[in-house]
Amino acid sequence: MPTPVNTLDFVVADLALAEAGRHQIRLAENEMPGLMALREEFGPTQPLAGARIAGSLHMTVQTAVLIETLVALGAQVRWASCNIFSTQDEAAAAVAVGPTGTVDAPAGVPVFAFKGETLEEYWQLADRIFDWSAEGFDGPNLILDDGGDATLLVHKGVEFERAGGVPEAADGDSAEYRIVLETLRASLARDPQRFTRMAEGIVGVTEETTTGVHRLYELHAAGKLLFPGINVNDSVTKSKFDNKYGIRHSLPDGINRATDVLMGGKVAFVVGYGDVGKGAAEALRGQGARVIVGEVDPICALQAAMDGFQVSRLESVIGDVDILIT
């Protein structure tokens, strides 16, 4: 039997932010009735009992509602953010403290995330969602991924363990990949079979983004995918709702928070006119910006033109662009 954890393992910016985060979580719960209905209907039967979930997803208030839903359904969870800047520190603190804990006695979920991580910190914290030794396990049996970084860490870990060591970085490797290599080198020094044992116990991974899904397809095509992957990104509720309508809400909000620049009258260039690009272009036009779209797919480019947007190559208009959305 696994032994219970007596001291909660977490890394957050400031536990004192937990109360503010809890208020925001309560507001978010009212906007997420599907998850709340799952808690009410399935909470008594604990369908996720035995699930050990390693989550790598933006540590926001909305993610906090997801995390606490997984726990309410019986899962054990360890969590990190999938982006160095996206963590809401109050949400991370609230999840660590938990609904019944206090700042002095946290009783929530092991969460490893804070806003403004360095790349070194990011990969070190990502590695910690796979450390289930205190619970008595080799690792998680499920990965909930966003962008594929957690999945990458496991696959590269297994690859290098089989090879007997982590290779030196090549001249063309990015600074971030060099950090990944150092993270895995430290892991192999501690336990040369850690990821190999872990991968054997992983039932599968869910992937939320287009980038991460492409990584999974590439691994599968090469015969290197170690466990099944579920493409959440292409589900209708993600691609047709979150992608389009989510960006329509969050893009103007993000620009305003980061710059407080009036968008009306500005020239905005949107790279790509898929579901996210459509929502972005619509949101910017709604703010009074003059929107130009760049698109390599002729069908999507024609859609942009039929929707009333100028379609141009980026290099031909970049000198006039005030806001660039990639």
Image: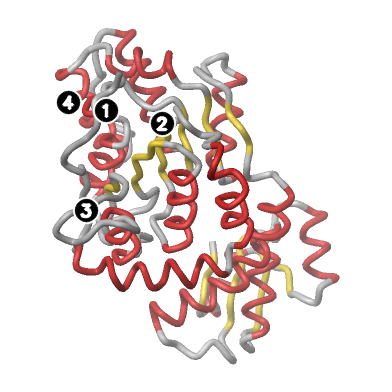
Residue 169 visible at all: no
Q: SS at mark 1?
A: helix
Q: Which mark, residue 135?
A: 1
Amino acid marked by disc 2: Arg
Q: Nearer the viewer, mark 2 or mark 3?
A: 3
Residue positioned most to the right: 306
The residue under the point 41% across, 31% down is 52
Check disc 3 and report its element: helix, strand or loop: loop
Decide which of tag 1 and tag 2 comes sooner along the chain.
Answer: 2
Residue 297 percent coordinates (x, y): 75, 51
Q: The residue tagged with tag 4: helix, strand or loop?
A: helix
Residue type pointed to by label 1: Glu
Question: Dot 4, how many residues are within 10 Å of its Cα: few (below 14), some (14-19), or many (20+)?
Answer: few
C-beta proximity under 8 Å, tags 1 and 2 = yes
Q: Badge 2: few (under 14), some or many (20 or more) residues near its Cα, within 10 Å?
A: many
Q: Which residue is mark 3?
A: 106
